[in-house]
Amino acid sequence: MERPAWDQKELTVGELSARSGVAISALHFYERKGLITARRTSGNQRRYPRATLRRVALIRIAQRVGIPLAEVKSALDELPDGRTPNRKDWERLSRTWRDELDARIRMLQEIRDDFSDCIGCGCLSLDRCGLANSHDRLSDHGAGPQRLTSYHS
């Protein structure tokens, strides 16, 4: 597929897919979820504003680091007139998401540190479990590996 001209105002779904590296089916999904929008031609073909490339890039970056699409949509919905995020918007979003990612990293480090010593009181560490779960207090929280799964709450 031919690369869209740098000054082209609108892109077909194929051009947007080729330029962004995102499958057409994913672009349709993003559109259904309200993350991106397209106008329809008289022949019912989608035409995306060129700025959609930046929106798709932001969506993909957020997905790559585990930001839920619903949260991405909320952030994009806060932009006036549905505009594409600019540098200031990105700085604000990345700062917010950075705090969330730092918290997730801390949680994963705690899980990693507990992982080698404890199955999470499921319990395969009976010889050491009295130190981590004396008197089986974790059973009050339900069956299974409570220590490691409780990080997801």
Image (tube, rainbow, N blue to C red):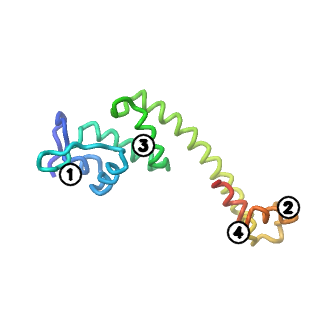
Cβ–Cβ below 8 Å for labels 2 and 3?
no
Q: Which dot, 1 or 3, sits closer to the camera? A: 3
Q: Position of residue 141 (x, y in %)?
A: 75, 61
Q: Earlier in the sequence, mark 4 or mark 1?
A: 1
Q: Position of residue 35 (x, y in %)?
A: 36, 44
Cβ–Cβ below 8 Å for labels 1 and 2?
no
Q: Where 37 sits versus 125, above or below?
A: above
Q: Residue 79: which numbered mark, if any?
A: none
The alpha-carbon separation of the residues under discs 2 and 4 comes to: 18 Å
User: What residue type is disc 3 on?
Assistant: Lys
Location of mark 2 (residue): 131
Q: Earlier in the sequence, mark 3 or mark 4?
A: 3
Neighbours of disc 1 within 10 Å: few (<14), some (14-19), many (20+): some
User: What residue type is disc 2 on?
Assistant: Leu
Location of mark 3 (residue): 73
Quarter holding residue 132: bottom right
Q: Residue 144: which numbered mark, if any?
A: 4
Direction top: furthest residue: 88
Q: Which dot, 4 or 1, sits closer to the camera? A: 4
Quarter holding residue 49: top left
Name the residue: 75% across, 71% down: 123
Horizontally, is 143 left or right of 152 in the view?
Answer: right
Query: Could you tell me which quadrant the C terminus lies in?
Result: bottom right
Horizontally, is 83 left or right of 117 in the view?
Answer: left
* In the foreground, 72 or 126: 72
Location of mark 1 (residue): 14
Q: Where 30 sits versus 81, above or below?
A: below
